[in-house]
Image (spheres, rainbow, N blue to C red):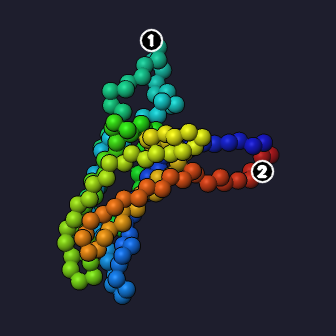
Amino acid sequence: VNVELTQLPARVDVKFAFPNEASGHSCTFDVTSYKIEKVNMWSQLILPDYPATGYTHNTAAQEVDLSWTKAESSESGISAFSFYTYEKATTSNPVVLTITGQLFDGTSTEEKTYTLNLNPTTSNGGETNGLIHGHLYDVTGNIDISSKRVTFNVTVKEWQQLNVGAEIK
């Protein structure tokens, strides 16, 4: 029996790279804090509760902000992070990522903050703006080490199919 399961949320992976890093240098961007604004925490496919008086659906608090800050006792920040969100149209209401960290350019370190308004476009039999369930959004912040500016690239991938065998007795 084949049972097809579709992932309800979308996953967003965030990392940084240095495409024009000089040979022999070891540039890093250690994330020390991030804030992700307007994450959709509610799926229209999951029914929340069934009170005796009938079904109610609270849409007032669908979006939340997520944040993380490195503990003072930690030696360094993180180099990548991920989060999940349910489907969300982002054309007029993007998910906003604000990422702060320590940028080491091979000789010195300075604190930098980068911001991305995440509004991806997916072409799957038609063009869709937003974060679509069952997709992986690979976000790479490419830091130009000479200007210390970032350009974000977003690659959209579908989840990979995994076949699992089960012996039912």
Q: Is residue 76 something one can see in this rendering?
A: no
Which residue is labeled 1 in the image? 53
Which three-letter amino acid code belongs to the residue tagged 2? Glu
- Left or right of residue 6: residue 82: left
Q: Is residue 167 something one can see in this rendering?
A: yes
Residue 144 image position (x, y, % from top left): 31, 70
- Classify 10 Å Cα crowding around label 1: few (below 14), some (14-19), many (20 and above): few
* Total numbered badges shown on the rendered structure: 2
- Classify 10 Å Cα crowding around label 2: few (below 14), some (14-19), many (20 and above): few
Q: Secondary structure at mark 2?
A: loop
Which three-letter amino acid code belongs to the residue tagged 1? Thr
The image quadrant that residue 25 belongs to is bottom left
In the rendered image, the residue lying farthest to the bottom is 24
Residue 27 image position (x, y, % from top left): 32, 77
Residue 15 image position (x, y, % from top left): 39, 63
Residue appearing at x 39%, y 73% in the figure: 19
Residue appearing at x 74%, y 51% in the figure: 166
Tell me which label, 2 or 1, sits earlier in the chain. Answer: 1
Residue appearing at x 44%, y 11% in the figure: 53
Q: State the CA–CA distance, disc 2 to disc 1.
A: 43 Å
Which residue is labeled 2 in the image? 167
Residue 93 image position (x, y, % from top left): 33, 38
Residue appearing at x 36%, y 33% in the figure: 62
Q: Quarter of the image containing the N terminus? A: top right
Of the pair 155 and 76, the residue shown nearer to us:
155
The image quadrant that residue 68 belongs to is bottom left
Residue 25 — which label?
Answer: none
- Left or right of residue 22: residue 158: right
